Amino acid sequence: MSTSDPQTEEHGAVQRTEAEQAVAVDEANRVPDASAARVVPAAPDAAADGELRPVDEQLRRVFDAAVRPSPVRVAISESQGLLCAEEVVAETALPAFDQAEVDGFAVRSVDVRSATEEEPVELPVVGEIPAGSQQPRRLQPGQAVWVAPAAPLPTLADAVIPRGSADDNPARVTVTRSFPSAANVRRAGEDVQTGDIAVRKGDIIGSAQVGLLAAVGRAKVLVYPRPRVSVISVGDELVDVDREPAVGQVYDVNSYALAAAGRDAGAEVNRVGISSTDPATLREVVEGRLLMSEIVVIAGGAGGSAGHDVRAALSDMGKVDMTRVAMHPGDTQGFGQLGPDSVPTFLLPGDPTSALVVFEVLVRPLIRVARGSRKPHRRVVHARLLSPISSTQGWKGYVRGQLMRDESNGEYLVQPLGTSGSHLLASLAEANCLITVGEMLTDVPAGDEVQVAFLAQNG
């Protein structure tokens, strides 16, 4: 059986199914060994406050809190990658006039209708029209005019004979075959008619859209700006990557990984870095970010003593709901709206893999909604499982995997990665998908079909 890596797709069809909240990374470069060991996702974390809440319900609460930045008008050179916030209507046709598609001779098609190798037609060349010419010219019957590519056609001309298709000299052109009307001509309005929508509201502005905006004469366009996301790490054990950890200390992984995930989702990210859990200090840091963010993410603020300190520091800034979410890894988390603008704020686990999974399941879709995207979720496909996996009943499981495709029949195949444990960041880095295991499943044998979310990166 031959396999190939599937093409990842960031803008696939939106399917609001349970599996759409899965995470995504880059395509893998190797085909995994189908004989890998049985994978058992980590058991849910220790109980947090409150009841167990389904993932879909938590996601609905997150969407309800979305804060979309107001549209702004920017130069088209600065619009790439943003979502268009208006219907751009062409005020002029594109092209605005009949023009030559190639270098050659503008003629009336009726004058060369009878041309053959045996009985060629000769036409006098009565002038030339360069590209950009503003001098109107009228072609008389039985005449030809040399035209440059993109040059306006003279009146009555309706075809262009390519220079290589005619035996020409400075004074006369010999035509050995007929050319129909509109041959090698770009008609006025052929691309866009006056009143047509050139770029639609909600379209992502790429290079082609920028070119089209320029072609219809738009210097600026209304867009949804990238939502601003602030990422903060808390934890007395954390040090930044430019320092040597002492005994009992670890590098701050979360602020770097989550900031990268936010940029991948299309946000403008401010990586605040490590903050003290001292209530006054943390409150000052968060208050400052609430003033300039549409989303705030605090990693390490969901569980343990650090989580207690974080919740205490934020208690007078708004409500943070610490209800456990029925997912693993990452069930211990918090979400609320803080500050006078009710900014959505997430408290994520301190474990980097759990934090990344929660970010992809809940934070990333919110970023996509906040930037105006009609498709907030990753693409989801069905794939045949190559090794068995187990899950915990009542929790939705997210299992790291490598997705591939059988070249012989186009079937998607998926190989689970890693072993038990939510902390295995290396296996997430190797993954190109997440397998979603429903709440009612405990064992999924090899050969069964599962839902899989692509993990795609730009680039």
Image (tube, rainbow, N blue to C red):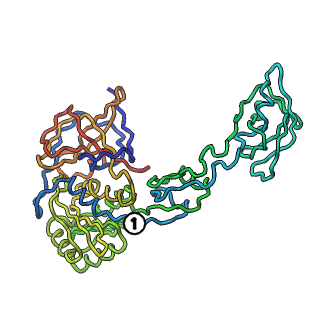
- Pinpoint residue 421: horizontal percent, then vertical percent: 17, 50
Residue projecting furthest to the front: 195
From this viewpoint, is residue 350 visible? yes
| Residue type (three-letter) at the residue carrying disc 1 | Pro
Q: Residue at x 75, y 40 (%)?
A: 103
Q: Quick check: 428 left or right of 439?
A: right
Residue placed most toward the observer, 321 or 233? 321
Residue placed most toward the observer, 92 or 208? 92
Q: Residue at x 34, y 31 (%)?
A: 3
- The residue carrying mark 1 is 69
Residue placed most toward the observer, 439 or 24? 439
Say if 290 sits above or below 89 in the image. Answer: below
Residue placed most toward the observer, 379 or 123? 123
Residue projecting furthest to the top: 118
- Pinpoint residue 306: horizontal percent, then vertical percent: 18, 69
From this viewpoint, is residue 244 visible? no
Q: Residue at x 12, y 62 (%)?
A: 48
Quarter of the figure that contains the N terminus: top left
Q: Which quadrant holds residue 57?
A: bottom left
Say if 162 sits above or below 370 in the image. Answer: above
- Pinpoint residue 21: horizontal percent, then vertical percent: 27, 50
Q: Which quadrant holds residue 353?
A: bottom left
Say if 400 sits above or below 216 in the image. Answer: above
Residue projecting furthest to the bottom: 280
Q: Quick check: 97 left or right of 249?
A: right
Q: Secondary structure at mark 1?
A: loop
Say if 248 sits above or below 190 in the image. Answer: below
- Pinpoint residue 111: horizontal percent, then vertical percent: 81, 31
Q: Quick check: 122 left or right of 38?
A: right
Badge 1: residue crowd in 10 Å (few <14, some 14–19, many ≥20): some
Q: Residue at x 21, y 37 (%)?
A: 36
Q: Which quadrant holds residue 342?
A: bottom left
